[in-house]
């Protein structure tokens, strides 16, 4: 399976999903208008990737900022990972990175952690 990469720029997060190492990373900013269209290829790749059971996946979430529309797409991603973790004998860990002092981003991660059945690690970036 091919890896999936998007180079981030203004409004658009960087995405680096590595099918070989099982390291999935997303970071930067996401606040463009057309999040459904932007995230559709990401969801398609993830759907195909998660069809292979029993992998150990690390999902690094390194966002600085995202809008409400993007947060919905992130919940969809977390739901897909939760289903994989629960129903396909996969092992998924989420590393939620946030800037020191950014309590909003920390609280957002804590809310996602409450909503999905995945282990979350909260990691302060300096």
Image (cartoon, rainbow, N blue to C red):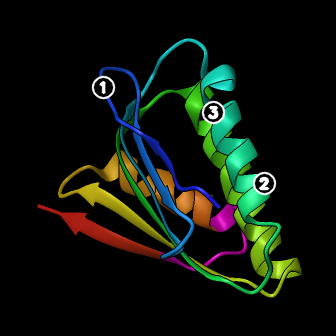
Q: Residue at x 38, y 49 (%)?
A: 105
Residue 69 locus on image (x, y percent): 61, 26
Distance from the alpha carbon under mark 3 to that under mark 1: 15 Å
Q: Secondary structure at mark 2?
A: helix
Marks 1 and 2, how far apart in space? Answer: 25 Å
Q: How many marks?
A: 3
Residue at image mark 3: 39
Q: CA distance from mark 2 to mark 3?
A: 12 Å
Q: How crowded is the residue under tag 3: few (<14 C-alpha within 10 Å), some, or many (20+)?
A: some
Q: Residues within 10 Å of mark 2 (few under 14, many from 20)?
A: some
Relative vertical location of residue 32 with respect to residue 17 in this rendering, above or below: above
Q: Is residue 19 left or right of residue 44?
A: left
Task: Tell me the residue that label 2 is attached to.
Answer: 47
Q: Secondary structure at mark 3?
A: helix
Quadrant in which residue 13 is drawn: top left
Mark 1 neighbour class, 10 Å CA radius: few under 14, some 14 to 19, many 20 or more: few
């Amino acid at each position: 399976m091919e890896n999936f990469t998007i180079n981030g720029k203004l409004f658009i997060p960087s995405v680096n999903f590595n099918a070989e190492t099982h390291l999935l990373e997303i970071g930067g900013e996401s606040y463009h208008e057309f999040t459904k269209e932007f995230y559709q290829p990401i969801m398609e790749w993830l759907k195909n990737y998660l069809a292979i059971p029993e992998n150990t996946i690390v999902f690094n979430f390194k966002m600085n900022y995202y809008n409400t529309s993007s947060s919905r797409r992130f919940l969809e991603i977390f739901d897909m990972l939760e289903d994989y973790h629960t129903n396909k004998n996969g092992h998924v860990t989420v590393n939620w990175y946030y800037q020191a002092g950014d309590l909003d981003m920390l609280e957002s991660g804590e809310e996602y952690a409450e909503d999905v059945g995945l282990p979350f690690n909260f990691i302060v970036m300096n």
